[in-house]
Image (tube, helix red, strand yellow):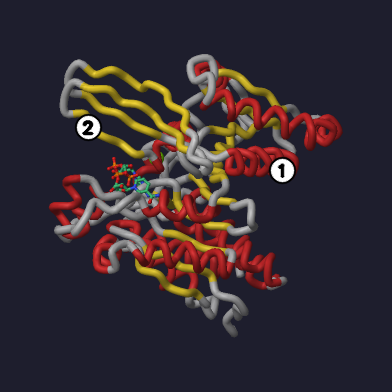
Amino acid sequence: MSKIAMTTPIVEMDGDEMTRILWQLIKDELLTPFIDLNTEYYDLGLVHRNETNDQVTVDSAHATEKYKVAVKCATITPNAARVEEYGLKEMWKSPNGTIRAILDGTVFRAPIQVKGITPCVRNWEKPITIARHAYGDVYKASEMKIPGAGKVELVYTAEDGSTEKVLVHEFDGPGIVQGMHNLNGSIESFARSCFTYALDTKQTLWFASKDTISKKYDHTFKDIFQEIFDAEFKEKFDAAGIEYFYTLIDDAVARVMKSKGGFIWACKNYDGDVMSDMLSSAFGSLAMMTSVLVSPKGYYEFEAAHGTVQRHYYKHLKGEETSTNPVATIFAWTGALRKRGELDGNNELIDFAAKLEKATIDTIEGGTMTKDLALITELENVTTLNTQDFIKAIRTTLESEM
Ligand code: NAP
Ligand code: MG
């Protein structure tokens, strides 16, 4: 059988720990035997990020602007413990934050549903897609520790030199302070990609923030969404029989729990970070969630929503067996291959992506899975496999279905 050819590269962003192990296994077992894989490789593993003073992360984002499609492995966001563990020169920023700041856009996350795994929330009959704004707020914040009594102010200096000032707090002792920002342009493209995605997938769109408390910051999000909806999308939504509605974030959380699913929930950056982890575990597993960053300029970055699965990696290093679920990482690859295929008119590649996704789901529905799924499935007589053998089982299904 001849391998599928690719005319344009995909930007490949390798990562850390257990997901780096998965990455190589997926390539070896599920991709390179079938595709003449054409990627431009960037090693975003923490060792290499440290060696390049994090330049590799910036380079990989710029490569995504060039080739339009990227696939990213989970990466470590350093904290104090990681600085020590890896002997880092600096506590490098979150690679996802850096990449999202360059590409802008919205992250759409949806559960991968399989028969035999029922969501924890009984009334969720359909998937809930989270649309996470991928720019700014706390991810681009400047922070300060305040050593003692004193005044903190926010100062805006306009280009003409005039200033506007607002008091943050009069400290009478030590404390902390944070300054965050967002851009109207970024919020507008966030709103447009959510409305467009809602129309594409014919799902109602919810958006929520805390505008009652944050009368300027969050209120601006609310206003921009409403203005764009009224001006550009209202009629199209009516025609499609879908709705847009805004509510307070705490009300949204309560309603989500009572809902049947089948809608898109647009979230500010932090809310989306937190809520997507809650939704993915409630739908089954952190490893059963697709995640794609859609930039308003037409760039796509596919990734897994979970982290580097550190605990499994340490077991792996000790030579112990692991049963790490590769599904989200496989779907990151299939998402990127499908999009590459669509942009290049490469039907073979689109077809392969669909086959690999089907083989993955069929393997699980056939009763063969990793431990995280075996613990929650209603299927009986399940075979639980280790990391390597599960990926090999998907390959067997794939070959039998091809
Ligand atoms: P994590 O990697 O998401 O894993 C947390 C726990 O969730 C695991 O210990 C495991 O539970 C379960 N889990 C997650 N993915 C799984 C999978 N594929 N298969 C089976 N179980 C899975 O979070 P973490 O261990 O707290 O974070 C590790 C590193 O990931 C951190 O350094 C963080 O910075 C980074 N991170 C990266 C990204 C990203 O690049 N997108 C996102 C989040 C976090 P059990 O141990 O109970 O089996
Ligand atoms: Mg998160």
Q: Residues within 10 Å of mark 1 (few under 14, many from 20)?
A: some
Q: Secondary structure at mark 2?
A: strand
Q: Tell me the residue that label 2 is attached to.
A: 145
What is the CA distance from the residue labelled 1 to the residue labelled 2?
41 Å
Q: Residues within 10 Å of mark 2 (few under 14, many from 20)?
A: few
212 w.r.t. 234: above or below: above
Q: What is the three-letter code of the residue carrying label 2?
A: Lys
Classify residue 188 as left or right of residue 307.
right
Q: Secondary structure at mark 1?
A: helix
- The percent position of residue 175, horizontal first and vertical second, equals 22, 24
- The percent position of residue 239, horizontal first and vertical second, equals 86, 33
Does the residue tagged 2 have its C-beta within 8 Å of any atom of ligand 1?
A: no
Q: Nearer the viewer, residue 224 or 388?
A: 224
Quadrant the C terminus occupies: bottom right
Residue at x 55%, y 42% (from the top left corner)? 110
Q: Tell me the residue that label 1 is attached to.
A: 196
> Do labels 1 and 2 touch, CB within 8 Å?
no
Q: Nearer the viewer, residue 219 or 192?
A: 219
Q: What is the three-letter code of the residue carrying label 1?
A: Thr
Q: Nearer the viewer, residue 239 or 328?
A: 239
